[in-house]
Amino acid sequence: MKVTMLFLGLLALFIAPGLANYNINVNDNNNKAGSGQQTVSINNAHNVANVDNNNGWNSWNSIWDYENSFAATRLFAKKSCIVHRMNMEVMPSIQTLDALAKQQKLQGAGPAGSPPKTMTFSISPHPVDDLSQFGANVASMCRGMPTYMAEEIPGIIPPLDTEKCYSANILWILNMSFCKTTEEQF
């Protein structure tokens, strides 16, 4: 019985880090047109990653629900939420995001390697009526605010009016731009 308990204790010791939540902070110490502070929280048990970007009025929060393949970004300046399908060919897996976020924290000032991947989205002008279709995590984050669906613009991106786009850059890993299609949006 003691051997069994010892074995279970050791097994739990090795399995627990894989199921734990990770919080990784990355600071932009110079804060000159930078991104302020980003925090990446990863919950392996629920297959969810949460990225918080604290940069005053340009702050945003993003949740990546790997189980339901939807992501949402809440833009605080616009008091709205943008939902999109996760493109797993571009967006890192939850394990890769975890490893890259830890690597970025150790480097402190961004990667010396390849440039970040880029995704551009076109935001639908019509608000979403039923948030439950995106899963509980996204619905919970976007509840109570105008929510819009965004479609990725694949391939080479035509020149866009950057004043109509909002950026969410994730730890020097992924640059996402959300572009409105009409002047009346938001």
Image: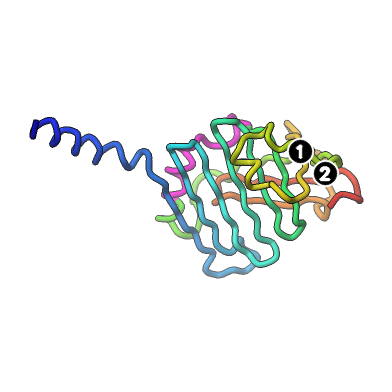
Question: Where in the figure is residue 151, as x and y percent of width and height?
Answer: 75, 34
Q: Is residue 160 above or below residue 136?
A: below
Task: Say few, some or many: other residues with alpha carbon within 10 Å of mark 1 (under 14 / 14 to 19 / 20 or more).
Answer: some
> Mark 2 belongs to which amino acid?
Pro
Residue at 14% across, 35% down = 5
Find the magenta span and give its range: 87-103
Residue at 42% across, 49% down = 22
Residue at 57% across, 55% down = 52
In this view, the residue in front, 113 or 141, is: 141
Question: Where in the figure is residue 30, as x and y percent of width and height?
Answer: 55, 70
In this view, the residue in front, 109 or 82, is: 82
Q: Is residue 93 left or right of residue 21?
A: right
Residue under pointer 2 = 159
> Mark 1 belongs to which amino acid?
Met
Q: Tell me the quadrant of the picture where the N terminus can be found.
A: top left
Q: Earlier in the sequence, mark 1 or mark 2?
A: 1
What secondary structure is marked by label 1?
A: strand
Task: Say few, some or many: other residues with alpha carbon within 10 Å of mark 2 (under 14 / 14 to 19 / 20 or more).
Answer: few
Q: Is residue 81 left or right of residue 55?
A: right
Q: Is residue 100 magenta?
A: yes
Q: Is residue 154 above or below residue 103?
A: above
Residue under pointer 1 = 149
- Residue 8: image quadrant is top left
